[in-house]
């Protein structure tokens, strides 16, 4: 072990490892959006970067959609009711490019996927 910690994974050298650990983010979403309480779960991957994190969200939706439809809805939200909170990018950026970004989260539209019509993956920085 590299450091003392009750979580043996977190006791490893963070500057040289990707470390899976717990996060309160899913629970926090339920506090902000009560309809989602108890419907989300997740974990964090601690990565040796000084700033910026990424969310890899996978959801089963009630109707079949396309990547274009998902991205269009996210782009409209980012330009409308969620402007200043949600960003939307069509550029091939990396974590460093989001350092200092004022949005709470920015959708990386190039990474949006749809599987079997109703399983959607959205990545946001």
Image (cartoon, rainbow, N blue to C red):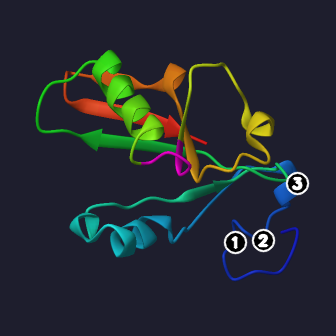
Label 1 sits on a secondary structure element that is loop
Residue 11 is marked as 2
Label pair 1/2, CB-CB below 8 angstroms: yes
Foreground pick, 52 / 76: 76
Q: Which contiguous range is marked in magenta? A: 82-86
In screen coordinates, is 122 left or right of 5? left
Which residue, given by chain and number where applicable, does mark 1 sit on? 8
Label 3 sits on a secondary structure element that is helix
On screen, residue 81 above or below 27: above
Q: Nearer the viewer, mark 1 or mark 3?
A: 3
Q: Quadrant of residue 68?
A: top left
Crowding near the residue tagged with mark 2, few <14, some 14–19, many ≥20 C-alpha atoms within 10 Å: some
In 3D space, how far apart are the residues under numbered discs 3 and 2 (Cα atoms)?
12 Å
> What percent of the width, then of the height, locates residue 2?
88, 68
Label pair 3/2, CB-CB below 8 angstroms: no
Which residue, given by chain and number where applicable, does mark 3 sit on? 15
């Amino acid at each position: 072990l590299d450091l003392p910690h009750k979580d043996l994974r977190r006791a490893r050298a963070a500057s040289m490892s990707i470390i899976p650990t717990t996060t309160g983010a899913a629970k926090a979403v339920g506090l902000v959006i009560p309809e989602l309480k108890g419907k989300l779960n997740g974990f964090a991957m601690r990565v040796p970067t000084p700033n910026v994190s990424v969310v890899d969200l996978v959801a089963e939706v009630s109707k079949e959609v396309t990547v274009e439809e998902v991205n269009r809805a996210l782009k409209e939200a980012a330009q409308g009711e969620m402007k200043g909170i949600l960003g939307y990018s069509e550029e091939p950026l990396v974590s460093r490019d989001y350092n200092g970004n004022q949005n709470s989260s920015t959708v990386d539209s190039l990474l949006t996927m749809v599987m079997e019509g109703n399983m959607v993956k959205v990545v946001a920085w």
